[in-house]
Image (spheres, rainbow, N blue to C red):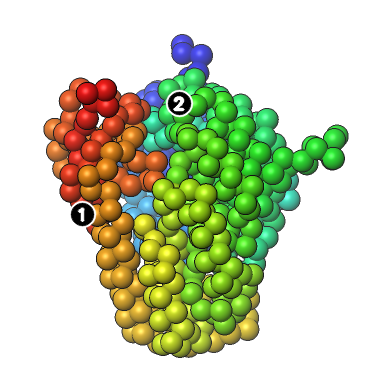
Amino acid sequence: MNKFYSVRPVLDKNLKQLYIETYGCQMNVNDSEVVLSLLQKEGYSLCENISEADLILVNTCSIRDNAEQRIWGRLDVFRLEKKKRPGVLVGILGCMAERLKEKLLEHPAVDLVAGPDSYRDLGKLIKALSTDGKQMNTILSSEETYADISPVRMDRNGVSAFISIMRGCNNMCSYCVVPYVRGRERSRNPESILKEATDLINNGYREINLLGQNVDSYMWKDPEKPEECVNFASLLRMVAELDPEIRVRFSTSHPKDISDELIYTMSEYPNICRHIHLPVQSGNDRILEKMNRKYDRKKYLERVAKIREVMPDCAISTDIIAGFCSETEEEHQDTMSIMREVGYDSAFMFQYSMRPDTKAYRHFQDDVPPETKTRRLNEIIALQNELSAESNKKCIGRIFEVMIEGFSKRSDKEMFGRTSQNKVCVFPANGEKPGDKVMIKVNSCTSATLLGERIDINQ
Ligand code: 5AD
Ligand code: SF4
């Protein structure tokens, strides 16, 4: 057996079969990999179809109401599956499990509910199902980081992998449910992060993506040597130095915390990718204050200017919320104008969705009419499409190092990969394989993709 077997899924039809479905952010994807690792130790093997599963697990997201509605819809599908095959067990994991607890457990399709900090307990909970009926553990921890668990990678490309460097969030943005469902912020021991990264590299992975709700507030204090701290800039440096050929990415940065030290550290290492995800949420100071973001437009733009001064080729992407409580038309225009001013390379854009328990839920009115939210969101999306197209057009004629991830979705005569700036680039295949780095000259683009051809840099 390959000595690094642990990072790949066990696929053995003779074992109990586990099907995992994952919703939400990259953090959840990585949590599902932790769950698979824990359950492989309990004798489960991963399967690809619900119809083969003995145990169906759904790792859920609560960030917006529509994310939760999708899960309720899936539960009806699992209920039918249980009618067809009565022995099948269904467990709900993650953020929605944490938020809704008994409400989910009461659903006829659900046997098990487990919150994000209780995955070590899963084996025990599953065993108890046969004797004691439905099971639930939604206790949040102030310490759990799953530092000693090697996640079993479920991705197909074998090139890029996530490492969670911290869990939870202390920021308390007034719209956000995350602090309630993921608990207090805690950082993971850097030694365990470096070990996980080394294992990945030894298994052929070529890109490491460090994950946290707010990576800039990563801070490890050794309980035995409290004077020696590791902050995010030093962690990033340590990961980048493991191997100069391995690309390193990270997300998410917070505009109030992203430091000059971090920006200079990035600039020192060519293998730290030139991309920062810096969610702005709104371009208006009154709304930013109401969101409890703890920066204003001026401070945000100052951070962008610093990034561009130190790394002119660094891409910047963002998250935007349209129609937060009491947002006026002028305030919406401020969001549009900051988008133009920054010229984002890409963005995730959402309509505001009031979440139970949050500060906004308790103190503000969700008073922007749904049709206004939708219209503002559509304006934001249309503008971002223009900005993304502009950003891509600037790449035409330039040469980029692209790390290949696989064949393009449209044709097996083309491959795709990403530039350091996280732009997807498609080019004609010529015997390359995932993980290879190639130099690509960009000839044309759409708003989503660069199209190019391979060039031999020595010619
Ligand atoms: N409604 C809409 N979007 C939200 N986000 C977080 N909470 C909400 C909400 N209640 C968005 C933010 C965040 C991203 C992960 O999701 O833009 O950065
Ligand atoms: Fe991720 Fe937040 Fe959704 Fe939880 S609620 S899955 S932390 S995006």
Whichever of labels 1 and 2 marks the residue nearer the N terminus, that label is 2
Q: Is residue 459 left or right of residue 226?
A: left
Mark 1: few/some/many CA within 10 Å (<14, 14-19, 20+)? few
Quadrant location, the C terminus: top left
Q: Which mark is residue 245?
A: 2
Q: Using the rendered image of the protein, determine whether residue 296 is visible from the camera's viewpoint.
A: yes
Locate residue 45: give its quadrant.
top left
Q: Which mark is residue 446?
A: 1
Estimate the x, y position of residue 373 in percent, counting from the top left. Answer: 38, 80
What type is the residue that disc 1 sits on? Thr
Q: Secondary structure at mark 1?
A: loop
Q: Please name whichever residue, 156 or 226, is drawn nearer the observer in this view of the structure.
A: 226
Estimate the x, y position of residue 11 in percent, counting from the top left. Answer: 39, 25
Estimate the x, y position of residue 213 in percent, counting from the top left. Answer: 57, 54
Q: Residue at x 64, y 38 (%)?
A: 235
Estimate the x, y position of residue 115 in percent, counting from the top left. Answer: 60, 52
The reply to whether discs 1 and 2 touch (Cβ–Cβ < 8 Å) is no
Q: Using the rendered image of the protein, determine whether residue 409 is visible from the camera's viewpoint.
A: no
Mark 2: few/some/many CA within 10 Å (<14, 14-19, 20+)? some
Q: Residue at x 44, y 79 (%)?
A: 334
Depicted 158 relative to depicted 346: above or below: above
Q: Secondary structure at mark 2?
A: loop
Locate residue 360: give its quadrant.
bottom right
Q: Please name whichever residue, 192 or 7, is drawn nearer the observer in this view of the structure.
A: 192
Q: Residue at x 55, y 37 (%)?
A: 268
Depicted 91 relative to depicted 146: above or below: below
Q: Please name whichever residue, 37 or 416, is drawn nearer the observer in this view of the structure.
A: 416
Spatial CA span between label 1 and label 2: 29 Å
Q: Is residue 353 left or right of residue 74?
A: right
